[in-house]
Amino acid sequence: MLKNFYLYLKFYFDKIFTSKYKIEGKCNCCGACCRNIVFMIEDEYVKTEKQFEDLKNFDAKYNHFEIAGKNDSGVILFRCKSLDNNNRCKDYFFRSLYCRAYPMVTDKIRLGGCATFDTCGYKITIDKKFKEYL
C-alpha cells in the first residue's frame, strides 16, 4: 500500500513540476525514422542479432523490420520493410503503433536531448521554461 502511495506521489509531482514538451511541425516524408529504428528489451537497447531473434519470437510485429546497421554505440539500427524507394510506407493504413506514435516524447527521448533527425520536419520543444518554475 505504501509503495502505491509513493508511485502516485511521484506521478503527480512529475505532472506538476516537470517541463511540458510539445511537438511542432509535420512529416517531411524523408524516411529517416523508418531507417534508423532502435528497439529495447526491458531497459537495454538491442545490440545483438540474438536479442532481435528473441524479440521476433516474442512478438511477430518485429518481423516487419530488418537490420540496417549499427550506430557508434553498438546499438543495432533497424529498417522497416514497408518503406518504398520514395520514402513512403507501403502499408501506411496498417502500420504499427510504433510508427503511428512517432515522435512520442518518452524518458529516453528526453534524456537524449529531445532530438529528431536533421531531415525530420518534427521538432520537440519545451513548453515551460526553467525560469517559469522559480
Image (cartoon, helix red, strand yellow):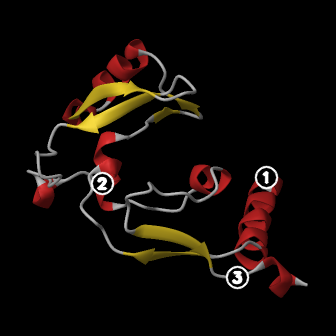
Q: From the viewer's perspective, is 48 left or right of 56? A: right
Image quadrant in which you'd find residue 58: top left
What residue did someone put label 1 on?
3
Q: Quadrant of the C terminus?
A: bottom right
Q: Residue furthest right?
A: 134
Q: Residue furthest front?
A: 118
What is the x, y in percent for residue 37? 38, 40
Identity, as a three-letter code, of the amino acid under mark 1: Lys
Q: Residue at x 37, y 58 (%)?
A: 119
Distance in Å between CA atoms under marks 3 and 1: 30 Å
**Amino acid type of disc 3?**
Lys
Q: Going by the image, does 33 lie left or right of 47?
A: left
Where residue 13 sits in the image (x, y, percent)?
A: 79, 71
Task: Name the N-terminal-most of marks 3 and 1.
Answer: 1
Q: Residue at x 19, y 53 (%)?
A: 95
Residue 99 is marked as 2
Query: What mark, if any, has residue 128 been given in the picture?
Result: 3
Frontmost residue, 124 versus 15: 124
Residue found at x 57% / y 54%: 109
Disc 2 or 1, which lies upstream in sequence? Answer: 1
Query: Element under label 3?
Result: loop
Q: Nearer the viewer, mark 3 or mark 1?
A: 3
**In the image shown, does 130 or 72 lie closer to the viewer?**
72
Q: Are marks 3 and 1 in contact (CB under 8 Å)?
A: no
Q: CA distance from mark 2 to mark 3?
A: 27 Å
Judge the density around disc 1: few (<14), some (14-19), many (≥20) Cα neighbours within 10 Å: few
Crowding at mark 3 (Cα within 10 Å: few <14, some 14-19, many 20+): some
